[in-house]
Structure formats: structure tokens, C-alpha cells
Image: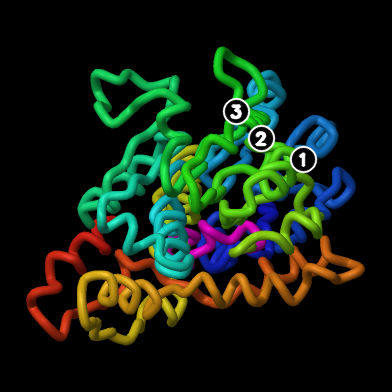
Amino acid sequence: MKILVDENIPAAVACFSQFGEVQQVNGRQLTRDSIGDAEVLIVRSVTKVNENLLAGSGVHFVGSTTIGTDHLDLSYLHANDIHYCNAPGSNAESVVDYVLSVICRIDNILDRLLAGATVGIVGYGNVGRRLGRRLSALGITCRAYDPLLDQSQFPELCSLEEVIDSDLLCLHAPLTRDGPFPSYHMMSADQLCAMPKNAVLLNAGRGEVVATEALQELIARRPDIQLALDVWEGEPDFPVALASACRIATPHIAGYSADGKLTGLNMVALELATFLGVELTSFDKPDYIAHAAPICCDGNDVADFIRRTVASVYDVEEDNLRFRAIIQSSARGEAFDLLRKSYPVRRELAFSDLTVGDAKFLSLLNALQSGK
């Protein structure tokens, strides 16, 4: 059996070789001709899996190691009896780490949140709920908007207007274009301009949730609002003016931790094993997972401890600086993809071997690692 896997999925060859012959491919450049005689396709969100790609092929299993499915034509797959799966929640903790690192890097937002300012979360699924849980464990107030959930089960849910009235607004809604509450371009510039003075807008969900034009208008009308964007309309191309105006700009890597990728890989591999009626056997984990060095964390006060601990595992400023270097590139789409392909190893707080130098910070460390 021939299995095509995206070349940017770590440990994929070691994992899927137990099922058949594995061939690595460029996921964004994958075409119908390059499918060949493959029966299994393992992708990420950059590959649009639809009739144009699969018509006439022998593919009968599609696995995406990412949390979303908006890149999969589910109707086509179902109609053609092609089994599919994704990896919901696999990189959710990685995205939460990204948000925490942004909080630690943008001016005084951490101090404001610890003093009582509010975080608003749009989209209360795997990422949104885990973000709310970790922030609440740190003593930070959260409110959330998700019209698809029952407020009686999640008392933190409120109206979109109330969530927008937050000092930090985090967008984690999946991309939907139909149904009663489509998320495509769901917020206008007028709505976002109602954010409090000196607020921060962070999008680590899908770029199409807010139109590029709306963000540009927001910047023009409310220069006090700072933007942290990891996702963009039209990826891998991105709007130069918008990216340049962001306090933090990154190339869709919020969920790019090594631990999240390995979790997604395992979820899809288990689904394939079940589909084939075989047992999933263990495979060699990368050295950076198997042999992580311990880190001792300390700080002068609560905010300092949080900043130092988060930065000891992941500092978003490094990703921001790498992205800044390509903003003016004449081939920025290719440069965007190269940043993702050559992304350095990044661990998650929950999976890192962290200890405290002072026992008074132990509860804070537990809160930061509550993704365990």
C-alpha cells in the first residue's frame, strides 16, 4: 500500500511505514497527477482535498493531522466512500501557549489582566475552552462567545458585544461559511472599534474570520489597538501593510509545537490502524521529545515568574522577528511557507520538564502547565 504524507509532518515516515510504502510530498503543491497509485493521503491544512485532487485516484483514506476540516470537502469524501479523519484538539495546547506568550510580550497587558482586566474568547471549542481554563487558573477573568453552545453548561458565555468589550480579544472560531452562525467575516470594523482603549486583538484561528479590509480600517480608526495575527486571508500570501502594522505577526504557527504535531500524528495513525483492522505499533520518537532537558523557573513576582517561565519554553517574539524579515520579500508566499517548513523545534509548557526555584510559585507553574 502506498501512503503519501506531507513532508512537514514530523516523524510521519517512522510512524506510517508500519502500514506500507511512505512517500513524502509538498502538501501545498500536491496535484491529481502526483497522487499516482496512492491509497492513503496524510495532509495538513494547506492541502485542499476535494474532487479536483482525488477524482480518478485510488485514495480511500484521508487523514489530516490538524484540528480543522475546512480544507476537506467532506461532502465529496462521504459521497465517494472515502474514509476521512482529522485530529481535533491535537494542537490546542500549543495555541494556548502561543496566546500566553503574546500576553507576556505585549507591553503591560499581562499586568492589566492580573489586575482585573478581561479576556474575551470568540469560539469556545477545544482551543477556546482550554485557553479559558488556563487563564482562569492564573486568576484572569474570561468571557466567551459561541452561539453553538448551551449557556446553561458554560456560564462564561455571553453576547458577542460583551466579548468584544474586552481588553484582550482572542479569535479561535473555526471557519464556516454556512449554517445559522457562519464565522466567515463575522466581525466588522465598526464592531471591533467598540473594543476598550489600548485593547489587543489576537487571531490564531482562521484568517477569514475577519476581513483584511476590516482590520485595516480598525488600524486607521483605532491606532491604540494592537494586533497579534497568526493567520491571514489568502495564505501563504499576506497583506504587507496589515502585517507591518501588527505588534506581533507570525506565519500560521500558533499550533506548531512538536508535541501538538506528534499528538495529531498519533490520532490519525490510530484511526488508520482501526480502518485497516491492524494494531498500531510504537515507533521511535524524535530525540527532542525523548530527551528534553529540565528547566528551573523563578521570578521576582507573579508577573515576572509567568513571563520568565513562558519565555523559557516559547517566546513568540522570535517568531515575530523571523516573520518581519520576510514582510517585504518579493516572493513572500514562498518565504511564508519556508518559515513553516523550517520551523524550529518548539515544546509545549505542559510537556516540558519544569521545576520552581521557590515553592511559592508552584501553584502558578501548575496553572501554566494545566494542559497536562
Q: Position of residue 341 (x, y in %)?
A: 68, 69
In this rendering, does residue 299 appear at all?
A: yes
Q: Does the magenta segment cover residue 353?
A: no
Label 3 or label 1, whichever comes before in sequence order: 3
Residue contact between numbered discs 2 and 1, judged by CB atoms under 8 Å? yes
- Tag shown at residue 91: none
Residue type pointed to by label 2:
Ala
Give the main secondary structure, helix, strand or loop, of the magenta stretch.
loop
Occupied quadrant, residue 132: top left
Residue type pointed to by label 3:
Ser
- Tag shown at residue 213: 1
**Relative to 8, residue 187 above or below:** above
Q: Which residue is mark 3?
A: 183
Residue at image location 56% in from the left, 48% down from the top: 203
Residue at image location 64% in from the left, 53% down from the top: 223
Q: Does the magenta segment cover residue 259?
A: yes
Crowd class of label 1 (few under 14; some 14 to 19; many from 20; radius 10 Å):
few
Task: Decide if residue 219 is on the left or right side of residue 350.
Answer: right
Residue type pointed to by label 1:
Glu
Residue at image location 23% in from the left, 57% down from the top: 138
Could you say which is closer to the camera, residue 324 or residue 342?
324
Q: Which residue is mark 2?
A: 189
Task: Decide if residue 237 is on the left or right side of residue 249.
Answer: right
Q: Position of residue 52 (x, y in %)?
A: 85, 34
Numbered disc total: 3
Residue at image location 51% in from the left, 62% down from the top: 15
Tell me the magenta residue range. 250-261
Badge 3 marks a residue whose secondary structure is loop
